[in-house]
Amino acid sequence: MKPSASAEGEHTAVYFDTVTKRFDDVAALNAVTLGVGRSEFVTLLGPSGCGKTTLLKLAAGFLGPDGGSISIEGKRVNDIPTYRRGIGMMFQNYALFPHMSVADNVAYGLKTRRVPKADRDKRVADALALVKLKGMENRKPRQLSGGQQQRVALARALVINPTVLLLDEPFSALDKSLRTSMQVELREIQRRLGLTTIFVTHDQGEALSMSDRVAVMSEGRIRQLGSPVDVYRSPADPFVASFVGDNNRLRGQFVSMQAKQAIVALGDALVRVPGESLSGLEKSAAVDLFVRPEQFDVVAPEEPCTIKGSVVAQIYQGGHVDLQIECSGGAGERLLVRSPGEQAVLRWPMGAPVGVAIQADQCSAFPAA
Amino acid sequence: MNQQPFLRIFTAPATLCAVGFIAAMVAVLQYSLRAYVPGSLDPGGFTLANFADLLKPLYARVFLDTVVVCAMTAVVTLIVGYPLAYALVRVEQPILRSILLVIVVTPLFLGEVVRTYAWIIVLGNNGFINSLLLSLGLIGKPLQLMFTPFGVVVALVHVTLPVMVIMLAAGLSHIDRDYSRAAESLGAGPIRVFLTVTLPLSLPGVVAGTTTAFAWTFSAFATPQLIGGGRVNMISNLVYQLGFSSFNFPFAATLCVAGLALTALVLGLLQLASRPLRKIEVH
Amino acid sequence: MIPRSTYQKVLGWVGLLAVLVIVAFLVLPAAVVTIAAFNDKPILSFPPQTWSWRWFGRALAYEDFRQGFFNGLIVTAWSSTIALCVGGMFAFVIDRYKFPLKSAIEGILISPLVIPHFTVGLGFLILAAQVGLSRGFAVVVICHVILVLPFVLRSVYVSLRNLDQSYEHAAASLGAGPLRVLTTVTLPLLLPGLVSGWLFAAILSFNEFTASLFVTSQRTQTLPVAMYNYVREFADPSMAALSVMYIVGTAALIAFANAFLGLGKVLNIEQSH
């Protein structure tokens, strides 16, 4: 684990120390501890109601914690109001002041900081150049497209050199193609400026593609904190496994432990899976295996395989083909299997009997709940 | 296939009402152009003399007083109503909100007479305020609060306050909270947030509220009649007096027409002045 | 608690104080009237030396008040119901349809909001005389319908705006004709808006004073007119007692409306998130 994740170190920009927040009697955040390193891009990912937005609002000062403390740059900010925190924030609907021009919107934070006019004008111009909006200074927000509005919101948040940039689902209002290019652009600017950033989203694709680290949240807790690859490859628990990326859950029975690997029975077949989280299980205890769609190999039914079944749906996705395979003999369980390229469309037609092999060393296993 | 079912049936009664109302207004207009025959309820021939009479100092004075009272009431109501509207929108606890709402809305439905009567008791020479001040020894003899423009404006502010608060609150409640949050995140303190974001965005509500307060005050009758007691005369009082004391309905009608023109002028100017505001788009 | 600087806290307290003062100003007349109503003496004095309920009895027994109350009920029942039907139907067509003179009719029906009531009253008084209508209930009711119509129109129109038309489309797709859609889908969904519109209209009509003063006669005078005449002639606390009953009744009605209909929604002042 990185030092910043467990304790507040000198490279920590924002630190949440066992932060608790309740609304009425419901705990929105339950003793959450999270350190965000300087210049780091950390994403809070989770379904709605998981507490990610609450955590962001606590960092911004729109809410105060019921327990624990929050520090920014080593300074406890529990009692510091928003306007003295030196943060920059982008809102879901941008919240561009509708009665001000683009330039006035961007200059707003500089005016509150009493930056002299000449300097202010220059910084506004630089910020607008940074987000490629030169020449738009005198427009009103409603005269801009969604993507342009977002750039203004970004410029407005960046121009004040915030200690930390807070992003509240800023891409959710954009259409898909624009979203991707804005994501790349934002990440580039963030890297160039070395800005500490906390990003909130419910979109796991966005989280994986943009972040240095991802904090997967659910029910007011951080379930896993790690790099996108960690979170995708080695989920810490069944929730993370099923929330991040597509996953198939297969119920099996624990057989034995060999070195660090566990032998699990899936029907008649035995598979060897990573066993860290299964140590101490009794024989024939129920085990859930999480297998990504791309961790299956579809083979002819007579070849050696783990599961037998037949194709019930073909979903052509362009670069790959998703197959739904109904397991034979089982209770109609369906597997989502991803096959690269397009050959699968012809090779495994609807209704065709197939065998499915598992790349078991890649999958994750947890004791069944 | 009829694409607009019920159109005729549903429009007919409303059209009838509109026609009836127009007929009543045309009747006023028509009477304003007729001569007054003293001692008779029927008007004489057509004339413009009534409008010439409007310029007499006595009547011009009433018009001026009316406009001054209306303008003062509208402005005071706005200043008093804004904090209350703000509180109504921002209070979080549902119970407190409901109490505030009922307190604000109830006077709206009490009617002018009950409220004016209550103010007579508050402002009268042996009323609440004077009794209180006398017993505290702050004054030696009762203050003259009744029959003064001050008393009339205070009571009128009370009459127009609910509608002002409701209109301001409607404006304020439609301002996305993220605007003030954004301003705060950019380093603006509470007063700056209010002056640069909340207030400008609530201006459409301010205009609507002020307009309505002006129109309502213009329409008030019982308050200036009972609290002004003849010493503060508004157009409404003059119209009633002319109609029911001297049966001079033609001139009463003329005053109504002139009053309408004046209202239209003031409201038109307010609309014009607030034109740039309409460009503000509040989500 | 949201983090607040001392400066913000002080501002908050100042604001709270201002709001309390304003609320006190709003409540003051009602409070003072209540004290006055229980004063045993017929002459106003603060604080009252002796207390009594007797003015309540006097107010309830006073013939003009009784007559005014029942006249008011008659006028209110007719005018609010007629206004609800007329306004409800018209709100429906302005929400849904385009037709000639639409905005003209709408403008005319909304205009009583800004036209002084004494002008409206005088207009109907003259019109009634011109068409030879005696000063009976009909004129009063018509006048009240015109005056409360803007409120009904707005109330129903807002409910119609918030009504998802896909319910009606769904009913139509299932084979319901326009009349069946209207009676089985639109009207039931619109019920809260209709009730609040009717309630609005009824309260406003019952309280309408200035125009009523012009169009009522001794025989048809409504309660506010009777009260006005009483205040001009007498100074005893009967009127205070009646005011207290009025205030309590109205506040109860408003609180009821708030609990069941959500005044915040009706008045369109709910905070958007």
Image (tube, coloured by chain):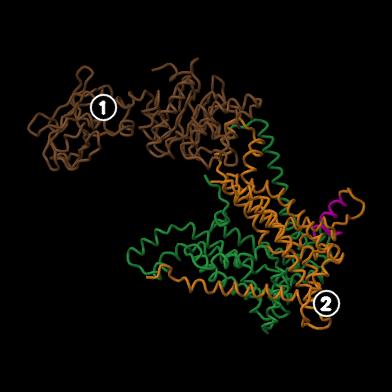
Chain colours: A brown, B orange, C green
Chain of the residue under label 2? B
Whole-percent x and y of residue A278?
26, 25
Q: Amino acid at mark 2?
A: Ser
As helix, strand or loop, the secondary structure at mark 1 comes to: strand
Whole-percent x and y of residue A314?
20, 41
Looking at this view, is C98 or C70 the one in front? C98
In this view, A149 is above or below B256: above
Q: Residue at x 79, y 73 (%)?
A: B48
The residue beneath circle 1 is A364
Point out the image quarter for the N terminus of chain C: top right
Task: Give the magenta part as a residue range.
Answer: B121-135
Q: Pointer 2: residues within 10 angstroms few (<14), some, or many (20+)?
A: some
Question: Can residue A81 be seen at all in this image of the molecule?
Answer: no
Whole-percent x and y of residue B252?
78, 72
The residue beneath circle 2 is B246
C-alpha distance separating marks 1 and 2: 98 Å
